[in-house]
Amino acid sequence: MKKIISLLVLVGLSFSCSESFFDLKPQGRASLEQLSNKNGVGALLIGAYSLMDGVGAGNTGRQSTISNYVFGGISSDDAVKGTDAGDQPEQSFIEQYNWLSDNTYFLGKWWHSYDGVARCNEVIQIVSSAAVKDMTEAEKTQVIAEARFLRAHYHFEAKKMWNKVPFIDEKVYVASDPNSTKVPNTEDIWPKIEADFDFAAKNLPAVQAQKGRATQWAAKSYLAKTMIFQKKWAAAKTLLEDVLKNSGKKLVANYHDNYRTTGNNNSESIFEVQFSVNDGTNGNNGNAGDNLNWPYSATAPGRGCCGFYQPSHNLVNAFKTENGLPMIGAAADGTLDTYNKVDLPNDQGIVASTAFTLDKSVPVDPRLDWTVGRRGVNFLDWGPMPGSTWIRDQAYAGPFTGKKWMYYVSEENSTTHSTSKRNVNNNFRLLKLSHVILWLAECEVELGNLAAAEGYVNQIRLRAKTGSVQDASVTYQVDAYPAGTFAAKGADYARNAVRMEQRLEFAMEGHRFFDLVRWGIAEKVLNKYAAEEAVPGTEPSGRKFNKRGYMAGKVFTSKNNYFPIPQDEILNSQKDGKPTLTQNPNY
């Protein structure tokens, strides 16, 4: 005992004059000193990019995946939740417009958006400090431009989700002070998002040495998208024309080259979220946020799990054509469209063991079979889709499966997949030249230039016509609008034609709901959709089949144009005894 006391006294004497002995640096965490150099800044910037896929912000990844399949897809008329009735009920609530502020999907998306913002602010704060001495001013400016591009993206995601959101920049954000970001959400943040994209556009190079980094063309395209959401048509047109004429980008010959691994970073792509596998992350960098959205069969792509995110009958019917054109009417909100009056023949209610013959009598746009898997049609190189054996619960969720994120069986290898076949390095194309062209068409309609709008739409339709088709046995029919159609039928028809083209071109890519809202037609379109999807369908032969009966009585109101701000975030925003965040109206 005496020996122990003597040893403790000796230790105390040895360090009594140096308090630094007890000043231990945190283990496993880089210090500000370690990060205040070119390598440290680069690592922080990669960390800001890494959240672009939606994975890594402390949630499931599904809540914030870059595809926005929950918020942009199943809350629209493009898709249903899929799987079965009891799986992921919080997604069912979103699909059926029953939006509560305690739904963890909203909370997860909020976390992700502002985690991304925080990472960007840390990059800007550190690279701007005098402590970083091994970078030129030009190098620092480019890093700040990339960080501001990313910060604008994360704020844009929040803005289109909730509208009333705070803008947090590097002057507001203090990592050591949790109260620093407790600011009101009463300001319209569009001008600050614009400022970030504008700075990026003026300070980023036209081409980056590393794929996946933002360029001036990505910034100009995203800035134009920001303008379009605000209906600043002339300003958006100027930016988009610059991208179209000067970026060097061009449409790829085959539509589906935009949706396969071999088409990553192709000539049409302006900005892609880079996916990777076998990189030490157990596949989490390979579309992990979408890893439930695969056919429910071990013989299908993904090799079995889990049947989420299935195309709606309404979407499938939208691809029907008449004389090579969409079946639309002269109403901007689509109320006079005829495509959904009779359903495209399908195998709803027909079990896999029962013979099924593909009905070729109804012509369709070839983009249908690059977007949707349906029985009897070739599924990439897997052979004809067998029907209900690939669907988890056909009676509940319908007979279709999504296709754009699927892969060719001939490409199923260790280069493109992790050990989970559902993690694939098929990038997400966030900005494509096709977006630019159809946004230009939209601008021209709103500016009264109907002939120019028609020309842009026809560029997209002609690519669909001449590009590859999936199944030679299907009757494909798609043509350009005859010259003068838009002018003859008027602005509302032209507006509807542009909107339909955007739906067909980008179906199942997570844009549809947000487009309906910014067009001001979400309430009318989605109530019509819910009513029609809830009742039995009818094929040209007269065969009846059940669709999504659970949509009966579901009502979309104007409050649903924006999602409820997570209640936890309102509670956590308390400062001086009062919350700084205000809930959206009527929630």
Image (spheres, helix red, strand yellow):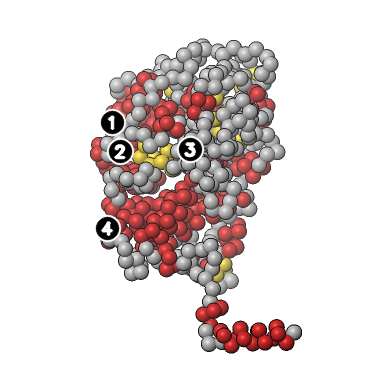
Q: Nearer the viewer, residue 377 or 536?
A: 377
Please tell me whether residue 135 is drawn above or below residue 402 in the rendered image.
below
Label 2 amino acid?
Answer: Leu
Q: Is residue 514 left or right of residue 465?
A: right
First in sequence, mark 4 or 2: give its number. 4
Q: Secondary structure at mark 4?
A: helix
Distance, label 1 to label 4, CA atoms, is 40 Å
Give the residue at mark 1. Answer: 452
- Camera-side mark, 4 or 2: 4
Distance, label 2 to label 3, CA atoms, is 40 Å
Q: Residues within 10 Å of mark 1 (few under 14, many from 20)?
A: some
Q: Position of residue 70 (x, y in %)?
A: 56, 41
Give the residue at mark 2. Answer: 447
Please tell me whether residue 23 is drawn above or below residue 308 in the rendered image.
below
Give the residue at mark 3. Answer: 425
Distance, label 1 to label 2, CA atoms, is 10 Å
- Camera-side mark, 1 or 2: 1
Distance, label 4 to label 3, CA atoms, is 33 Å
Q: Nearer the viewer, residue 578 or 363?
A: 363
Q: Secondary structure at mark 3?
A: loop
First in sequence, mark 3 or 1: give its number. 3
First in sequence, mark 1 or 4: give its number. 4
Q: Quadrant of residue 303?
A: top right
Distance, label 3 to label 1, CA atoms, is 37 Å
First in sequence, mark 1 or 2: give its number. 2
Q: Residues within 10 Å of mark 2 (few under 14, many from 20)?
A: few
Q: Position of residue 450 (x, y in %)?
A: 30, 30
Give the residue at mark 4. Answer: 138
Residue farthest along the right direction in this orientation: 1
